[in-house]
Amino acid sequence: MVFAKIVETEKELQDAFFVRKEVFVKEQGIPLPLEIDEYDEIATHFVAYFENRPIAAGRVRFIEDLTATVDRVCVLPPFRRKQIGVLMMKSLEQYIKGSNIKKVKIKAQTHAIPFYEKQNYYITSPEFLDAGIPHRAMEKVFDS
Ligand SMILES: CC(C)(COP(=O)(O)OP(=O)(O)OC[C@H]1O[C@@H](n2cnc3c(N)ncnc32)[C@H](O)[C@@H]1OP(=O)(O)O)[C@@H](O)C(=O)NCCC(=O)NCCS
């Protein structure tokens, strides 16, 4: 069974970093100092496990009044297209909704736009490069 949880221990944080390094550093070639950044100290992290192995991660930050940002959402390649990305987003959004937040902003890698659109995020910017990878800004507003 796959389950996602908020990171509460140093081991769980290292598990989340493990998945992020596998996906963003090894698979996508993003330099480690860009991937593990200063926001990790203030973000709330999430990790998902399958049979005690970390397989997915993501993080949330509250950036301004009533707005949060979600980033670093990732699933290890063998576990993709099994609704685990959706599980991560639902876990992150459930946490955000508990904080009276009305809007979530993301910077979506262009290839992942259909994934976010299926979860009711909409595009708010033209394409731009971040760490050399094409992105577009997206948002989702929660019903009050
Ligand atoms: C993007 C990512 C998190 C999606 O995770 P996932 O577990 O494969 O996604 P899910 O299985 O939950 O997919 C949910 C829906 O989105 C669709 N989807 C997922 N990735 C997609 C893609 N790249 N292109 C088109 N549709 C996609 C799925 O087909 C599924 O549709 P359905 O509900 O109609 O069946 C995963 O591909 C990943 O880790 N990619 C590398 C890291 C990355 O780029 N992260 C995004 C940074 S912005």
Image: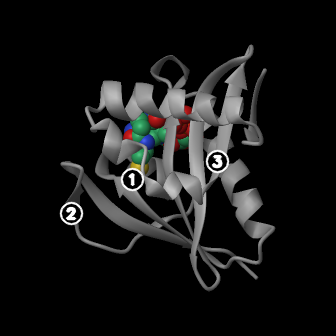
Q: Nearer the viewer, mark 2 or mark 1?
A: 2
- For the residue with label 1, is its CB less than 8 Å from the closest atom of ligand 1? yes
> Under tag 2, what secondary structure?
strand
> Under tag 3, what secondary structure?
strand
User: With respect to residue 110, does 25 lie above or below?
Assistant: above
Badge 1 is on which residue? 113
- For the residue with label 2, is its CB less than 8 Å from the closest atom of ligand 1? no
Q: Look at label 2 and name its amino acid.
A: Phe
The picture places residue 29, in percent across and down from the top left corner, at 25, 32
Badge 3 is on which residue? 45
Q: Residues within 10 Å of mark 2 (few under 14, many from 20)?
A: some
Q: Are marks 3 and 2 in contact (CB under 8 Å)?
A: no
Name the image quarter holding the N terminus.
top right
The picture places residue 118, in percent across and down from the top left corner, at 53, 53
Q: Is residue 129 left or right of residue 5?
A: left
Question: Which mark is first along the chain, 2 or 3?
Answer: 3
